[in-house]
Image (tube, helix red, strand yellow):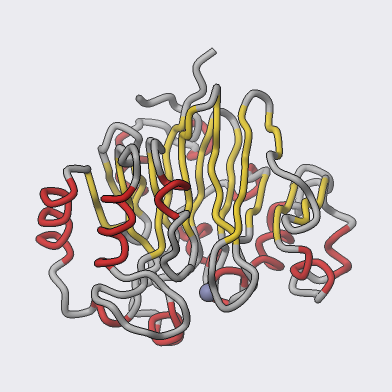
Amino acid sequence: MEVVLNWILFLGTGGGRVVTSKQFRQTGGFIVSLERNLFWFDPGPGALVHARRLRFPVEDVNYIVISHNHLDHVNDVNVVTEAITLRAYGNLTVLAPSSTFSENVLYSYLHERLKQKVELDKEVPPFKIGEIQLTWFQLEHTTLTYGFSFIHNGKKLLTYISDTAPFDKLSEYISGTSFLVINVLFPYRVNIGKHLSIPDLEDIVRKAEQKPRRIIITHLGGRYLHENLMSLSEELSMRLQVDLKFAKDNWIFFPDGHLTSYRKYLSSSGQTKPGETLFKRRR
Ligand SMILES: [Zn+2]
């Protein structure tokens, strides 16, 4: 049976202290629709507000995935958990470093509402969701941080590289993935806080045995403010020979390379209830 990646919705594309504090770009993470599951990655500040403004059916989310406990990635995990479990307890699984639970990053009284807690540093990947496997691997950041890949029949459908310094194994982690979502905080090399820059990304992609089919760059810091992202993405796509785009707040990306604003997607789908359009298959 073919497993379908439906789309990725970016609720926030900003990262780092300045952009998060000034909200030059939204923060709030991204939601992946895979088969009939919704995965909310790194719900940073504003996650719930942005989702509600889009009339996104928050209650339908089954999984929250936290890459690490920095506030631009995890700040809204409590309110998002509250919202998802409003209708019923026991439908939501949270995958996160064990400190997210033990240090009350996710308040302890919310734990009992969960179907499952998956402590990434205490369990051995992969985590199975039907025929899909979600696997994880450690990155090199200033706190314990993970990257993730969805795998089906040995094929990487989607890989997410969160905050990290460049290191050799990154090329292996991204190799052969259909879709790569990667946090690249800086347009040029800056030696602050173990983050990737665009030149690092180019190195990682060039060294990969098999290049990703499509790349979406997110978690953009303040140094991009004066960059022309359209021409930068065209330039990089040419140089790397891959389809590379920068994520946009409230935009939805499809595996065929098509992208549109979420509002447009809802109105063009001809459905009155947003929930009805969520699992529309696209290739
Ligand atoms: Zn971080």
Q: Residue at x 42, y 74 (%)?
A: 195
Q: Looking at the image, which is closer to me, 24 or 122?
A: 122
Q: What x and y, as percent, mark residue 106?
A: 76, 69
278 vs 250: above or below = above
Q: Looking at the image, which is closer to me, 224 or 172?
A: 172
**Image quadrant of residue 86?**
bottom right
Q: What x and y, as percent, mark residue 193?
A: 47, 82
Tell how many labels: 0
Q: Residue at x 51, y 58 (%)?
A: 51
Q: Quadrant of the N terminus?
A: top right
* For residue 273, side relative to residue 66 (left or right): left
* For residue 257, side relative to residue 91 (left or right): left
Q: Residue at x 83, y 63 (%)?
A: 110
* For residue 50, side relative to residue 125 (left or right): left
Q: What x and y, as percent, mark residue 131?
A: 64, 23
Identity of the residue furthest to the top in this view: 1
**Image quadrant of residue 147?**
bottom right
Q: What x and y, as percent, mark residue 41?
A: 56, 55
Q: Looking at the image, which is closer to me, 161 or 202?
A: 202
Q: Quadrant of the C terminus?
A: top left
**Image quadrant of residue 186?**
bottom left
72 vs 229: above or below = below
Q: Residue at x 51, y 38 (%)?
A: 33
* For residue 52, side relative to residue 201 (left or right): right
